[in-house]
Image (cartoon, rainbow, N blue to C red):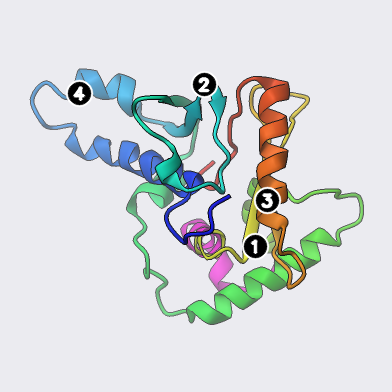
Amino acid sequence: MNKSGSKTIQQAEESIESAILQLNKLQDMPGIAPVLNFLAPRGYRPVVELQEDGRSMRRHDAATEWTPEFGEIRIYFEPATDAELSAASDIEPGDLGEYDEAAMTRELLEALEQAEKTPGHTFVAIKWFRDTFLPSRGYAWTQRQERRHLVLSKAIEDGIVLTSRIPNPRAPLHPTTTIRLRRENDESAAAEDAVGLQTVGIANDLLSDEDLSE
């Protein structure tokens, strides 16, 4: 479990995914285009997993736990819309337009609390929350997908929204990423997530992620 405040495995994976998308900006460089068909195929988003001994590492651990001597990086691709790719590759921290960041975060947390109480939902899938539930709350800033992406990403980075993965019966190799609020008495939440991720990893051999840019 990462207690040092350094970048986590999850943040490192997301940074690598963003960097891969940025490679498309090099498409006019001589000799690069054929390589980009493999490293950054257009119309797809990358999913990155830092692994050790053939298993995905726990996402709340420090990124420094991964080493090139013993670690591996698994990269695969999933279809994505142009808007989703733009949100993942072009949005910069602080690009929140005319809206107040604190107000947006507060409304995001209010919406997530409501989503957690939605009848019939035993968990909150991150993509469903970002693209369906959050816009339905009527907040003006949620009408732009890239802004929803940015605010939710920041809340996860700040540790006020926790992520975890659960098995997906329809796609065993691609577990669903879920989110929930971190509450005052949730001291062991990160540790519980880490244990849960390790269990899923053992059960499914390989973990995948329906992450923020899906």
Residue 118 lies within the magenta run: no
Q: Position of residue 144 (x, y in %)?
A: 51, 61
Residue extent of the magenta highlight: 137-153
Q: Earlier in the sequence, mark 3 or mark 4?
A: 4
Residue type highlighted by circle 3: Ala
Q: Which residue is mark 4?
A: 33
Q: Earlier in the sequence, mark 4 or mark 2?
A: 4
Q: Mark 4 falls on what kind of element?
A: helix
Q: CA distance from mark 3 to mark 4?
A: 43 Å
Residue type highlighted by circle 1: Pro
Q: Where 53 falls versus 188 (above or below)?
A: above
Pointer 1: residues within 10 angstroms few (<14), some, or many (20+)?
some
Residue 141 lies within the magenta run: yes
Q: Which residue is mark 1?
A: 135
Q: Position of residue 161 (x, y in %)?
A: 63, 61
Q: CA distance from mark 1 to mark 4?
A: 37 Å
Left/right of residue 85 with respect to residue 139 in the rendered view: left
Q: Earlier in the sequence, mark 1 or mark 4?
A: 4
Residue type highlighted by circle 2: Asp
Q: Mark 1 falls on what kind of element?
A: helix
